[in-house]
Image: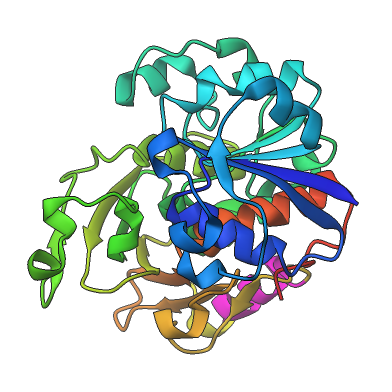
Amino acid sequence: MIKVGIIGASGYTGEEAIQILLRHSNVEITALTALPEECGEIGDVFPSLKDKININIEPLELASFAKKVDVVLCCLPHKVSMGFVPKLLDAGLKVIDFSADYRLKDPSVYEKYYVTHTDKENIKHAAFGLPELFRSKIKGAQLVANPGCYPTGASLAIAPLLKEGIIEFDNIIVSAITGASGAGRKPQLTFHFPEMNENLFPYAIGGVHRHSPEINQICSEVANTDVAVLFQPHVGPFDRGILSSVYCKPQTKVDSKSLLQLYHKFYDNEPFVRILDKPPTLKAIARSNFCDVFPVVSADEKTIIAFSAIDNLIKGASGQAIQNLNIICDFDETEGLL
């Protein structure tokens, strides 16, 4: 039985991770921590977990925490996580980090979008945790950088086209819409219900979103050459989910039937990618670790459009983290997730 602890357990991703781990037959939750003002009885912090688990959320005391766990889910914000991860690794623990602190392989790119990085050494050793594309690098890893939600949906939509080299690599557009939970659990005026209700708006205009370099990094690695993606996010008046629409220019003539065959072959053995013959919907993937994908050629045959839908809190965060946990611990990859 693997002992799992969660640092930053009081947020949405912490709650989702606990719900999934309670269904997992090979793990035991042994420690939950958060900032002192966010601690307390689990049923008070998350009413949905009342009487399901008897562990309270407590302030982090690293020495005692390290003795209780084998694997850590680090649900801390960007810029904060790298202050804890080196100490967790030094204690001999395996770490799955939810922040962006170990996703970008080039520290200078990270520092352009975030802050000065204080743990560049561990960037070199972190496995990027998108199993469908990088499973072999995740196996046996001590540190896994859990991908961002937008990059997960966009990359899974486009990966077969990149791998086969049938599209132009410098003319890719990703337009994606997320639910308000993507902003986290702490209240913000922009995502207050009266602001969000019956509303829809773009943000981080023109490719400046922090997930842009992550999407480019994934796509470039899959294509084995530099890939430039224009990423434009939006937020809509719903709780959870991301719908991505990816627009690409084919290099040769292709039809929708052959595209579907390509996608089925590429994801044939992937338990959490479902290839559809119609556009995906957010309701179909809500509270699941699935990514639904639908590729199609436009009526004028000049554009390939690939749609994907994921739950941003599950496949985009906690579910994918536990999928990674299953891989590094050599469990069935679907354990706790179906």
Rendered image coloring scheme: rainbow
- In the picture, measured across the screen, residue 73 lies left or right of residue 13, that is right
Q: Residue at x 65, y 23 (%)?
A: 62
* Range drawn in magenta: 258-268
Q: Which quadrant: the C terminus?
A: bottom right
Residue 259: in magenta span:
yes
Outermost residue toward the bottom in this view? 278
Q: In terms of image quadrants, where is residue 140?
A: top right
Q: Give above or below for 77 relative to 301.
A: above
Q: Give above or below for 221 relative to 85.
A: below
Q: Position of residue 149 (x, y in %)?
A: 45, 53
Q: Who is closer to the viewer here, 22 or 238?
A: 22
Q: Residue at x 38, y 38 (%)?
A: 37
Q: Who is closer to the viewer here, 276 or 164?
A: 276
Q: Position of residue 126 (x, y in %)?
A: 66, 28
Q: In terms of image quadrants, where is residue 127?
A: top right
Q: Residue at x 51, y 78 (%)?
A: 285
Q: Give above or below for 237 relative to 209.
A: below
Please tell me whether the stretch drawn in magenta is mainly helix, strand or loop. Answer: helix
- In the picture, measured across the screen, residue 270 lies left or right of residue 237, that is right
Q: Position of residue 27 (x, y in %)?
A: 82, 55
* Residue 233 visible from this viewpoint: yes
Q: Who is closer to the viewer here, 17 or 213?
A: 17
* Residue 251 visible from this viewpoint: no
Q: Position of residue 276 (x, y in %)?
A: 55, 84
Residue 76: in magenta span:
no
- In the picture, measured across the screen, residue 228 lies left or right of residue 40, that is left
